[in-house]
C-alpha cells in the first residue's frame, strides 16, 4: 500500500479571495489536471478552487459546517480544513485503522464522484483524509 501527500484543504468563507491570494501572492497556478468531480447534491455543495505548486495541490473550499450532518458522518472535512493523502489501497488502509482502533468517517464518494474518501482525527484533532481514485 502506497501513501503520498496529495493536497491540503483550507476552509474559507471567501473562495475567490483565497484563490486570488494564493495565485497572486504565492505564485501558485490553477490546477487543471486530476480535477475531482464534485458531487454537489450528496452532502457538500460548496465552491472549491484548486491551486498547485506543480506537485502538491491546495483545495480552497467553501466552509460548510452542516456537511457532516447532511452525510451522517462524524468527521466534517470542510468545517476547518484537512490534510489529504492518496493511497492505492483504501481497504488495506481502513483495515490498518481498524487494527489500531482509530475511528474514521467513510464518505465513500459523497463529495467526489471518483474518489473513495475516509476522514479521521490525529491526536490533536486535526482532520486527515485518505482517498483512493476509483477506476
Image (cartoon, grey):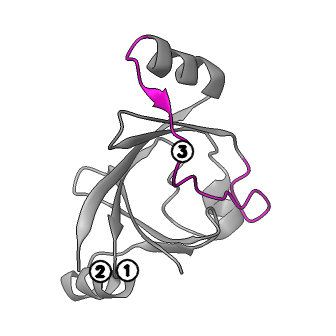
Residue placed most toward the observer, 25 or 41: 25
Give the extent of the magenta segment.
25-45
Classed neighbour count for the residue bearing mark 2: other residues with Cα under 10 Å, few (<14), some (14–19), many (≥20) = some
Residue placed most toward the observer, 23 or 61: 23
Disc 1 designates what residue? 90
Say which quarter of the image contains residue 131.
bottom left
Residue 121 got which mark? none
Q: Are marks 3 and 2 in contact (CB under 8 Å)?
A: no
Residue placed most toward the observer, 50 or 125: 50
Classed neighbour count for the residue bearing mark 1: other residues with Cα under 10 Å, few (<14), some (14–19), many (≥20) = many
Where residue 103 appears, x then y in whole percent? 35, 75
Q: Is residue 134 above or below residue 28?
A: below
Where residue 100 appears, x then y in whole percent? 19, 81
Looking at the rendered structure, the secondary structure element under dot 3 is loop
| In-image side of 115 versus 99 (left or right) | right
Classed neighbour count for the residue bearing mark 3: other residues with Cα under 10 Å, few (<14), some (14–19), many (≥20) = some
Amino acid at each position: 500500500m502506497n501513501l503520498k501527500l496529495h493536497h491540503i484543504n483550507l476552509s474559507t468563507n471567501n473562495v475567490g479571495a483565497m484563490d486570488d491570494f494564493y495565485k497572486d501572492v504565492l505564485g501558485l497556478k490553477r490546477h487543471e489536471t486530476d480535477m475531482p468531480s464534485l458531487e454537489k447534491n450528496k452532502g457538500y455543495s460548496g465552491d472549491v478552487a484548486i491551486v498547485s505548486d506543480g506537485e502538491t495541490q491546495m483545495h480552497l473550499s467553501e466552509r460548510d459546517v452542516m456537511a457532516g450532518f447532511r452525510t451522517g458522518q462524524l468527521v466534517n472535512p470542510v468545517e476547518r480544513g484537512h490534510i489529504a493523502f492518496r493511497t492505492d489501497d483504501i481497504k488495506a488502509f481502513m483495515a490498518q485503522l481498524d487494527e489500531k482502533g482509530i475511528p474514521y468517517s467513510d464518505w465513500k464518494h459523497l463529495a467526489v464522484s471518483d474518489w473513495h474518501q475516509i476522514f479521521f482525527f490525529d491526536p490533536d484533532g486535526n482532520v486527515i483524509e485518505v482517498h483512493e481514485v476509483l477506476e
